[in-house]
Every structure is written in C-alpha cells, then in structure tokens.
C-alpha cells in the first residue's frame, strides 16, 4: 500500500530517506554526493511523484520504490 509521504512524521521520513540513500548499490552518478544532498534529491522525487513510500503488511516493512514500478 502507498503511504502518503506528507502524512509521515518529518523526522521519521528523514530517517527513512537517509536509510534508503545509504543502501549499498544506490547509485547517484559519477560524482560523490553527500547523504544530505541525496535526501534532498529524494524529497524532490517524492514531491514530483517519481517515487513513493510503500508499506508491506506481509513483510511489515516500509520501502521506497519508483512510482512507475509500483503495482499495488
């Protein structure tokens, strides 16, 4: 289920975005980007509806996925 990011506590959302941005395999291009900048980029993508926050009841987990890839 998609969780409206606007309904998530600001601190919780920031922690979620930081965790997502710091995962192994997360690639932001040729240049090094700070964690703070990555979080800002993710917030912009949320605002543009390019990514969404999803909750899985089955796995009791939260994730961030591409809006194009979410089918759920």
Image: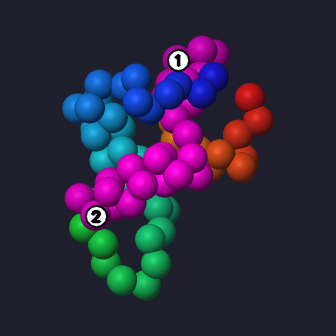
Q: Which of the 4 quarters of the picture holds residue 9?
A: top left
Pointer 2: what residue?
A: 37
Q: Tell me: residue 60, above or below residue 11.
A: above
For mark 2, does the 10 Å Cα neighbourhood hold few (<14), some (14 to 19), or many (20 or more) residues? few
Q: Is residue 45 visible?
A: yes
Q: Is residue 5 left or right of residue 58?
A: left
Residue 24 rendering spot, x and y as whole percentages: 43, 58
Residue at 25 percent across and 67 percent down: it is 34
Q: Tell me: residue 10, above or below residue 27.
A: above
Quadrant the C terminus occupies: top right
Residue 39 rendering spot, x and y as whole percentages: 32, 54
Which comes sooner in the sequence, label 2 or label 1?
Answer: 2
Mark 2–mark 1 distance (CA, rounded to whole Å) = 28 Å
Identity of the residue furthest to the front in this view: 48
Residue 61 counted in the magenta span: yes
Residue at 46 percent across and 78 percent down: it is 29
Magenta highlight range:
36-62
Q: Is residue 36 left or right of residue 48?
A: left
Pointer 1: what residue?
A: 60
Q: Secondary structure at mark 1?
A: loop
């Amino acid at each position: 289920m998609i969780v409206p990011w606007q309904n998530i506590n600001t601190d919780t959302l920031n922690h979620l975005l930081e965790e997502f941005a710091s995962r192994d395999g997360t690639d932001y291009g040729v240049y090094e980007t700070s964690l703070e900048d990555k979080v800002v980029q993710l917030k912009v993508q949320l605002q543009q509806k390019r990514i969404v926050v999803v909750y899985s009841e089955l796995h009791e987990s939260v994730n961030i996925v591409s809006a194009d890839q979410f089918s759920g």
